[in-house]
Image: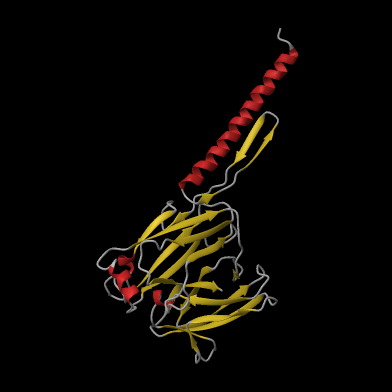
Amino acid sequence: MQNPKLLKLKRKFRRNKRQIGITAFVLFACIVVAGVGLSFFYTSGSFSGTSSTITIPEYAPIINGSKNMNQNINLSNTITNNKRLAPGAVGKFKVDLDFSSVDSDAYYKVYFDRTNIPNNIHFYVDKDLSSELFSIEGVQLLENSNKTAEHYIYWTWEYSDTTESNENDSLYMNQEINLPFVAYVSQNVERHTVIVNDQEKPTGRINISGTQGSFNINLDFSNFDSSKNYKVYFNSDDVSSGLHFYTDSSYQNEITNINGTYNGSDSSINNTIYWKYDGGSLNTSLYYVVNLS
């Protein structure tokens, strides 16, 4: 018969060995996922007696239909004004972040790499090219019913008749231009954003139907402790040129966006938008984006 103390030591060694193996697996999973791109997740686990359980939340953000966090946009394929890819061209593309397979809150940021594109190409939040952007940033909470964070990006290759601009433009004329971008996604919500119609995310959609009506855009700035300028843009060109927005129910004061200032104290700002459609009856969802400065 073996010594009882020796048996106890052997059982303790086997239990510790099993726990060490599970811990190593968790660390390996974190390293593998982090190595795919700029995407990070956490795991949770517990050990009780001789049984061990590990819970690994699903974490597979999809960017424009792909798990690849490093992608390219061919600007030639996104031109909207029938110009060739040269000064004067205007275009639009989308960056969609799908969080359907992410079982946690998430923070995201998308960076554009300007290393190999003309100096005079600029990117904007809106079709009027009034709010320039350099990156996309937002929060996608697990509780949000809409699991996709949509972002329309507008761009233009501005014409400037200076020696420096002409020299730089000539480097890219008659070529395809691929715009690289990198998506950073993390469960660590590094920065919170405005709450729009009870959802903490900067973009979304509103359902509209019929020939005219109204909808509310409620902006909650309780995540901020200082004043902010805001603009809310609507992507009406994807619906129809016959869709118009107004600040009044008599449809007299037409607008293309909502803008104002959060003063740092009154956290909730409600805007009622009236709309009218010239081309018959609508039944669609309207994209919006909130831009803060």
Give the quarter of the figure containing the C terminus. bottom right
Residue drawn at point x = 37 percent, y = 58 percent: 72
Q: In the rendering, at what x and y percent does residue 157 appear?
A: 35, 73
Report the residue that reaches farthest toward the front.
Answer: 163
Residue 89 in sight here = no
Q: In the rendering, at what x and y percent does residue 6 appear?
A: 71, 14
Report the residue that reaches farthest toward the left.
Answer: 174
Residue 70 in sight here = yes
Q: Quadrant of residue 163?
A: bottom left
Residue drawn at point x = 70 percent, y = 30 percent: 49
Q: Quadrant of residue 144?
A: bottom right
The one nearer the camera, 48 or 134, is 134
Residue drawn at point x = 66 percent, y = 26 percent: 15
Q: Is residue 128 above or below residue 183?
A: below
Q: Quadrant of residue 161?
A: bottom left
The one nearer the camera, 58 or 266, is 266
